[in-house]
Image (cartoon, rainbow, N blue to C red):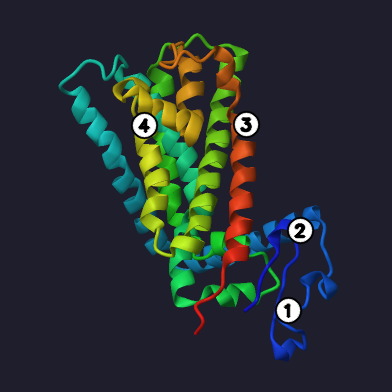
Amino acid sequence: MADEIAASGTVVAGAGASAGVSADAPVEAWIPRLSRRAALRDGLRAYGLIVAMWMRSTMAYRASFVMTAFGNFAATAFDFVAILLMFAHVDALGGYSLPEVAFLYGTSATAFGLSDLALGSMDRLGRRVRDGTLDTLLLRPVPVLAQVAADRFALRRLGRVAQGLLVLGYALLTLDIDWTVTRALMLPLMVLSGAAIFAAVFVAGAAFQFWAQDASEVQNSFTYGGTTLLQYPPTVFAKDLVRGVTFVVPLAFVNWIPALYVLGREDPLGLPDLAAFLPPLVAVVCCALAGVAWRAGLRAYRSTGS
């Protein structure tokens, strides 16, 4: 079996007698150590090449792409239709008006859509671990994370991003917000930071599958389930749940905490306004922890034995 030491940017290709290296020999003895920057550059380049390949494959059948992208748009739109049906019977949801809920929905859906577009294939890792096809990726001189993330890149997921942006546009047109420079900058900040936080959850969930092997639904509960949770005001949930998604799995920093600052609302947990500016820092910490989990999972992988 081939192993990749991603922590130091080292990629191991080939193993066994065919490579003329003992299985017990230290990796560093025969594999040159790459710098972290070079490893990151190689990984991004490999990801871009694989994504470009899948995009060319998709655009070869443009009518099919348009239909599947529209289908993705329509399927995700039903979530907002459900919200509209609620507001057909009530004037406020947890004290929030329809435009305010639409703002939460739009920011969450857009952030998640960008992350799902880039890393939505990560939930296939468990299947690769079970059937042993992950070994094929380990044999290639390309970071495994880049290969898994770009595998079967689905351009149709742009439909989800477009739908989130459409709802966000509606919210911005109907909300009466006292716009300042900081509030205006907070909008792209929360979307990009939220996408990075969701990306970290995708990677950490995939890393968990190295041990669980059949845990894609657990991963989806934090990704797809997380974005659904964030589409509603925090005031409709129990405070213990709000604390959990703030301090344990910090999904609240995707849009709840910065959105409350933009909307001029008080945080139900009593956090200061300064917390609204923490999403970039939270995103960096989450990505770093996800990277540690990924490297640990990859080192623990022992193939299927077949």
Q: Which residue is mark 4?
A: 231
- CA distance for labels 3 and 2: 25 Å
Who comes first in sequence, dot 4 or dot 3?
4
Q: Which residue is mark 1?
A: 24
Who comes first in sequence, dot 1 or dot 3?
1
Q: Residue at x 40, y 58 (%)?
A: 215
Left or right: residue 72 versus residue 142 is: left
User: In the rendered image, is residue 123 in sight?
Assistant: yes
Closer to the camera: disc 2 or disc 4?
A: 2
Q: Which residue is mark 2?
A: 8
- CA distance for labels 1 and 2: 19 Å
Left or right: residue 277 versus residue 171 is: right
Amino acid on which disc 3 is placed: Pro
- CA distance for labels 1 and 4: 51 Å
Near mark 2 (Cα within 10 A), the count class, few <14, some 14-19 or many ≥20, is some
Near mark 4 (Cα within 10 A), the count class, few <14, some 14-19 or many ≥20, is many
- CA distance for labels 4 and 3: 20 Å
Helix, strand, or loop for circle 4? loop
Helix, strand, or loop for circle 3? helix
